Amino acid sequence: MNIIDTSSSPLIANEEEMIKNIPLFKIRPINYLLPEGIFTDVIFQSTASVKNFKNFEICNKKNIYTMGQSTKFILSSYGVESSCPTPPGSDELISLLGKNLSGRRFLIVKGVDGLNKIKEFLDENMAFSEEIICYERIELNNYNDLKSEFEYASAVIFTSVLSAKMYFKNIHSKDNDVTLFSISKRVKSEISQMGYESKIIDYFSDSLLDDIKKAI
């Protein structure tokens, strides 16, 4: 069995060499200026937003939020604990932020073309917020060399919408008998809109490999 994880920040163990990590885009850091003023809440929207952020000192004694478990895990490796919705997603994070936004000042750390739903929610509720854009995602120059890696895949795991888009644009073949897995409802929905079906998998399950085997 050949399982491919397309995450740009893999967290799963390569159990018995059955799960191989092949990212489908590159991350390029962007220089940013830290906004002036005091913030009460900091939101990290992705693992890349954590890895390309340089000012973790501002997280001290703040309310820290992450969009999903993978971002929470990466952030903890920098010594910063955060709150994270279960299941992951923008709507779930909005519920976690609560309705009492008065007096709170939010800093959102994200990438170019990152989700705007949290920012829009804060603006609609008259809450102060600013954004830091600290990275961008870049398509690979050539996907031809990767096609052979996916040719005999039994399963492909998508941890982001962009990975799915790059896969179907550059790699996918209708002749391949492959089971597709998404780690969230949002990724599954986007794949469905592209005309394909995927199964939601618990990316952080202790029995991930067994779960995949059962679902194939």
Image: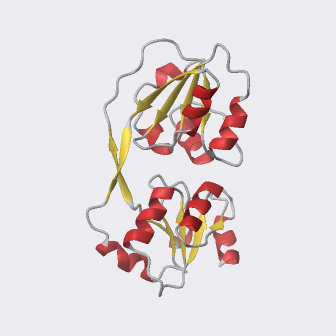
Q: The N terminus is located in which quarter? A: bottom right
Q: Residue at x 58, y 35 (%)?
A: 118
Residue that protrudes farthest toward the front in the picture: 124
Residue that protrudes farthest toward the bottom in the picture: 175
Q: Residue at x 50, y 71 (%)?
A: 17
**Residue nearest the viewer, comparing 52 with 106:** 106
Q: Position of residue 142 (x, y in %)?
A: 27, 67
**Residue nearest the viewer, comparing 131 with 150:** 131
From the viewer's perspective, is residue 17 above or below residue 76?
below
Q: Is residue 153 left or right of residue 90?
A: left
Image quarter of residue 119:
top right
Q: Position of residue 158 (x, y in %)?
A: 53, 62
From the viewer's perspective, is residue 122 above or below residue 61?
below
Image quarter of residue 91:
top right
Q: Residue at x 58, y 43 (%)?
A: 73
From the viewer's perspective, is residue 33 above or below residue 6?
above
